[in-house]
Image (tube, rainbow, N blue to C red):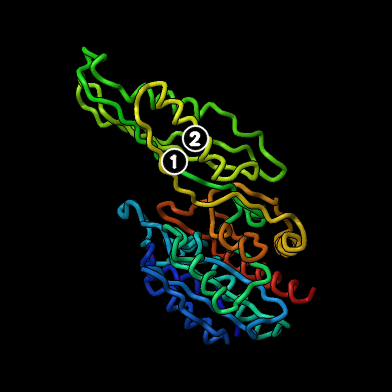
């Protein structure tokens, strides 16, 4: 009897695993994989639950890895949902529920494919699933904890597939071979409060922050590279909180986010922003403090054997040759790339994070078929 990826997706969706709550999802997955012959280890760290599952011997000559997550984003306005958000109900060919697209269906499809594959065609090597409960959160104790544990325990993956949704509109149209870097800078500009009628007795931080935001956002960072679109800086907010019409404020804050390609790294961009902040501080006689948070550096897995393997399986099952993309936000592939070559392929992500998130049932079945072919082709090569 084969493992049903639709039923497994539904079971996972019924687990209310909003980050960082485990919600029963990893407990369920561990039970299913253990019964399928996998050796499972919980790798929890802090408040985060993680699961490592391996079929085959440790230190095998080659190990195919899969990375995914069972945590989901909050529901938003629950009253706006037309279907129960954790009900996993099927209507008009779609399975509804938070996490159905991002990415419990991907986890279920690979788990189902892996269980049936190792049972029917035991490979010469090992198959690993590294599943986290913290991809949608801070991602500090999720996949990074799994990779730290793997390094300590001599567990390795030769290559890795991340099962995030990668197709914008139709199944098979795109896969990810890299991701842009992402960083956020928080500025606090402090002057001196005073009466608006006597500006010479105050130091207004508003013109300073306006100048700084203009300088940062006006710079053309680059024109794009072979695998990436142009980098960009966006001003997200300028906050002063001054309700008075006759008071020059003492302080204002601003936040920018940069999505950058492989022309840059976070250290260089940080140094550039700090230099511009120092110039503005000197010009306007204010104090400018900057704090930076880096979500991930830009990376690319050069097209080659791994991307060819994934693309070949996708084309065989869908009739479409996927575009090699680096678009979108960040994913846990940014951590895996330090361990082994990594690519991403999953289903259509049009409704992820939305109210009434849903996945086409036939896509889940098709995704299992693609993942099965990937495993078969990898171990046959």
Q: Residue at x 57, y 41 (%)?
A: 268
Residues under numbered marks 1 and 2 in contact, where contact means CB atoms less than 8 Å apart? yes
- Above or below — where is 223 with respect to 350? above
Give 6 or 249, whichever is nearer the viewer: 249
The percent coordinates of residue 342 (x first, y second) are 65, 62
Looking at the image, residue 240 sits to the left or right of residue 99; the answer is left
Residue 169 visible in rendering? no
Q: How crowded is mark 1: few (under 14 residues within 10 Å), some or many (20 or more)?
A: some
The percent coordinates of residue 54 (x first, y second) are 58, 80
Sequence-first tag of 1 and 2: 1
Quadrant containing the N terminus in the rendered view: bottom right
Q: Which residue is drawn at 65% across and 83% down?
A: 118
Looking at the image, residue 44 sits to the left or right of residue 259; the answer is left
Q: Which residue is drawn at 45% across and 48% down?
A: 293
- Give the residue at mark 1: 185
- Above or below — where is 217 with respect to 141? above
Which numbered circle lies on residue 273? 2
Give 152 or 105, whichever is nearer the viewer: 152
Residue 130 visible in rendering? yes
Locate residue 16: give its quadrant: bottom left
Q: Residue at x 51, y 40 (%)?
A: 270
Locate residue 338: give its quadrant: bottom right
The span from disc 1 to disc 2 (Cα, nearest Å) is 9 Å
Secondary structure type for disc 2: helix
Give 288 or 378, whichever is nearer the viewer: 288
Give 20 or 204, whichever is nearer the viewer: 204
- Above or below — where is 295 with respect to 86? above
The percent coordinates of residue 356 (x first, y second) are 42, 55
Secondary structure type for disc 1: strand
């Amino acid at each position: 009897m084969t493992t049903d990826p639709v039923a497994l997706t539904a079971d996972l969706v019924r687990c209310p695993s909003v980050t960082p709550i485990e919600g029963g999802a990893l407990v369920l997955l561990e039970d299913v994989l253990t019964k399928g012959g996998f050796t499972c280890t919980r790798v929890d760290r802090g408040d985060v639950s993680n699961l490592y599952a391996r079929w085959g011997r440790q230190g095998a000559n080659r190990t195919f890895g899969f990375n995914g997550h069972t945590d989901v984003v909050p529901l938003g306005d629950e009253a706006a949902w037309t279907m129960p958000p954790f009900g996993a109900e099927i209507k008009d060919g779609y399975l509804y529920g938070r996490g159905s697209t991002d990415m419990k269906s991907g986890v279920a499809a690979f788990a189902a494919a892996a269980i049936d594959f190792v049972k029917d065609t035991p490979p010469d090597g090992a198959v690993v699933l590294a599943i986290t409960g913290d991809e949608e959160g801070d991602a500090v104790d999720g996949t990074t904890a799994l990779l730290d544990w793997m390094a300590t325990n001599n567990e390795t993956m030769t290559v890795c597939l991340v099962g995030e949704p990668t197709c914008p509109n139709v199944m098979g149209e795109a896969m990810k071979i890299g991701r842009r870097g992402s960083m956020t800078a928080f500025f606090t500009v402090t002057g001196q409060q005073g009466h608006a009628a006597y500006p010479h007795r105050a130091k207004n931080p508003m013109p300073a922050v306006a100048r700084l935001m203009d300088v940062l956002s006006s710079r053309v960072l680059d024109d794009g590279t072979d695998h990436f679109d142009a980098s960009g800086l966006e001003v997200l907010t300028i906050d002063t909180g001054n309700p008075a019409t006759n008071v020059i404020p003492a302080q204002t804050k601003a936040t920018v986010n940069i999505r950058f390609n492989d022309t840059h790294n976070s250290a260089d961009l940080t140094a550039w922003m700090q230099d511009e902040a120092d110039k503005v501080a000197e010009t306007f006689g204010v104090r400018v403090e900057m704090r930076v948070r880096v979500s991930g550096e830009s990376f690319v897995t050069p097209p080659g054997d791994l991307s060819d393997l994934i693309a070949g399986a996708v084309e065989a099952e869908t009739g479409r040759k996927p575009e090699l993309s680096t678009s979108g936000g960040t994913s846990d592939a940014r951590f895996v790339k330090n361990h082994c070559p990594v690519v991403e392929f999953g289903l259509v992500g049009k409704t992820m994070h939305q109210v009434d998130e849903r996945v086409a049932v036939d896509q889940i079945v098709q995704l299992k078929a693609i993942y099965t072919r990937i495993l078969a082709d990898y171990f046959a090569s």
